Image: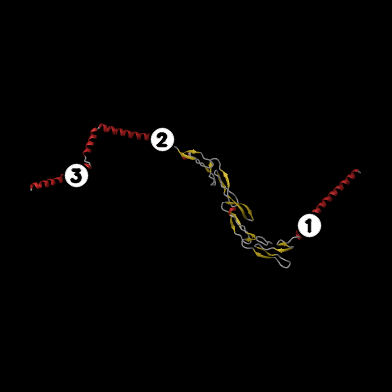
Amino acid sequence: MKSAGETWIKTLFSLLKDMLFLRTIISMVAFLVAANFELCFCGCARAEYEINGECCPMCAPGNRVYWHCTVDTSTTCVPCLASTFTDEPNGLTKCFPCTVCATVKGLKVQKSCMRFGDTLCEPQEGFHCIKQKKGSCELAVEHSKCQPGQYIENTGTALSDTVCVDCTDGSYSNGSVMSCLPHSKCEMMGFKEKKAGTTSSDAECEKVTSVGLVVLVTIAVVLVVAGTVAALLACIKYRKCNPQHSNKDVEYKSKQPSEDDETAHFTSTNQQQISVPVDILESAPHSL
């Protein structure tokens, strides 16, 4: 008898659980039905708008409501004025103002505003968009500039920024190239490295001065100087050992009349030629 009672109690509890579960399901179904009923029967149609308890037909894009509908009349619509628009069916009494693509926001006009569509803006050259709405850019910023020691992996576009990557050892970039350049190998070019290269600058090279060349140049200079000194000494010695030759040169030079001597001689000659007639004139009265 005890086992039969326990079985009956377990069966009763199982039935109660099933009933509670069924009640929960019924409550959920009733809630969903009521919600759908409100959605279906308590609103206007998709192409209508509600005003004063009436469902009025919407105006087409590019138009606005001039008069709302009544029981006897439909909605009266008029076109949007210049620099205003509506881009969807609406029950508005005023059109939206057209967007201005502000240069201070890095924008320029992609497509001008029309009464059935707003202005479309796009980034200026060298800018990329960081905020968009309905296919139009609302804010743009300038592309990042790669720093010395970096190269441009991807150039900036209207929708993405420039991607910069650091140069590896043994290469360099000033920040404006698409790939890093290898450092110059001074030794391979016949030069000596003056300054090692960095990631932002190339290696600096200088000409190699050969020791042998320096020695040859030095010897040549010494020989030229020595030859010049020897020639001077020989000339001086020659003059001392041949004094007659020197005196002859002096004597010959002294015999050569100078311009002053010739002038003086010419003057004295003329004076003598003129003095003869004077003597004749002085003696002429005595003879008379």
Q: Quadrant of residue 119?
A: bottom right
Residue 230 vs residue 50: left or right? Answer: left
Q: On the image, numbered disc 3 is attached to which residue?
A: 267
Q: Amino acid at mark 3?
A: Thr
Q: On the image, numbered disc 1 is attached to which residue?
A: 34
Q: Amino acid at mark 2?
A: Val
Q: Residue furthest left?
A: 288
Q: Amino acid at mark 1?
A: Ala
Label count reads: 3
Q: Quadrant of residue 93?
A: bottom right
Question: Which residue lies at the image location 23% right of the left edge and 36% below the top edge?
Answer: 250
Inter-mark Cα distance, 2 to 1: 108 Å
Instruction: Pick the residue in front: 125 or 154.
Output: 125
Inter-mark Cα distance, 2 to 3: 68 Å
Residue count near mark 1 (Cα–Cα under 10 Å), binned few <14, some 14–19, many ≥20: few
Discs 1/3, front? 3
Question: Which residue lies at the image location 37% right of the left edge and 35% below the top edge?
Answer: 221
The image shows residue 79, relative to residue 251, as above or below, that is below
The earlier-in-sequence mark between 2 and 1 is 1
Residue 212 rendering spot, x and y as whole percentages: 41, 34
Q: Secondary structure at mark 3?
A: helix
Q: On the image, numbered disc 2 is attached to which residue?
A: 214
Instruction: Pick the residue in front: 191 or 72.
Output: 72
Q: Are marks 2 and 1 in contact (CB under 8 Å)?
A: no
Residue 13 rendering spot, x and y as whole percentages: 86, 47
